[in-house]
Image (cartoon, rainbow, N blue to C red):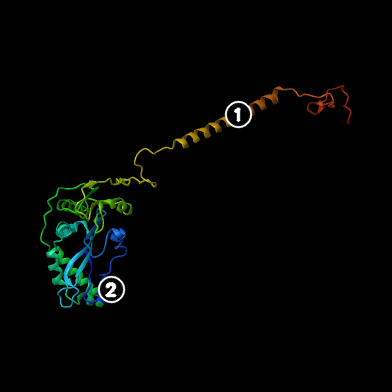
Amino acid sequence: MKLHFRTRDIGVENDYPAIGWMPSLPSGAEKLWRKFGPLGAAEYPQIVVAGDGKKWRMYLEGLDSGRTDSPAGVGGRVIRMSLYLEGDKTEAGQIVATLADFIVNFLVDGEQDWFKSAFSDLIKPGDPFNWRRNGTAAQLTAAEAILARLIQHPPQTINAVEMSPGWATGKTKAGAEKFAKICLAILEGRLKGTALSLSSMTLNDLPKARSIDSSILAVMSSRPDERERSFPIPVERESPRPPVKRPGCTPPSGPAETGSPEVDPTHSKLKAFFLAAVALSVTLLVALFIRSCVNGKERPPQTNANDVIIQTNVNTDEFQGKIPGTADAPKR
């Protein structure tokens, strides 16, 4: 499991953009939440969880770091924390308590005493600036310390029953526990898709969010007065199974057949018409050939009145001996 965090330090020159994410985020990671645009806002409580059945990613925003931007530590604006985590489904159990506390207590009631104490012990004024200046090694050390603290979060109980995907709720305690159940199922690889609760999103924004990400399975609104509702989700089709290799058999070189091949009826009709045409043409040619042969043997030659008939005397002596007493045929 890996963790990346973003916070700020005291002083205007050390604001969130100046400090940035530490360590730097993987390529394309920010698209997980930025693609929803104005439905979410930085520094406000929100969460996005996504998984493909094997690996997962999670974005947590708006946590109180237990610090303010006042040099004296008294007064001033609260310094927030943003977390990006990614891991394997086998690691879900290590982060489930943090997930449940964030959703059920922080998003609904604003309660985050545990987070404030955990972060304030790990991050002192001047630390974010020094980590940024000292490079990746110092940032990795800080991120690993924060992750270790999250894994130590006291166990949390989620009382809700298992929820089916395709479900949305307002920001209520009961709704948050059901939402947490779906988030946990995504982390554990039992569901594939996305669950989110964005700081400016209502359930009226659900069609827009789903047009951006069709894999959305669950949504918790930013408003507590919205009722639960369900929505259809696309059904994932199974990919064709690969051919089974058997000892002594050579696997086919082409794609595996999953059943009877589908036949295009139009193609079949054209093929039948073509074969019939070829057969008819061959039959006609054979008939014409036979007729011409028969006519050539039985039909006597025809002459016209204007034709000149030349009579030729055949010398039979060339084929058999001369008959005594016969005269020689005149030579031409």
| Disc 2 to disc 1, C-alpha distance | 89 Å
Q: Position of residue 157 (x, y in %)?
A: 11, 54
Instruction: Check disc 2: other Cα within 10 Å, few if <14, some if 14-19, many if 20+.
Output: some
Residue 280 versus residue 202 in the image, above or below: above
Residue 269 versus residue 139 in the image, above or below: above
Instruction: Report the residue marked by disc 2.
Output: 18
Quadrant holding the C terminus: top right
Asked whether the residues under the numbered discs 2 and 1 touch, taking CB atoms below 8 Å apart as contact, a structural biologist would say: no
Q: Is residue 253 left or right of residue 221?
A: right
Q: Earlier in the sequence, mark 2 or mark 1?
A: 2
Instruction: Report the residue marked by disc 1.
Output: 284
Q: Position of residue 240 (x, y in %)?
A: 33, 45
Q: Amino acid at mark 1?
A: Leu
Quadrant holding the N terminus: bottom left
Q: Secondary structure at mark 2?
A: helix
Q: Amino acid at mark 2?
A: Ala
Residue 319 versus residue 108 in the image, above or below: above
| 50 and 307: which is toward the camera | 50
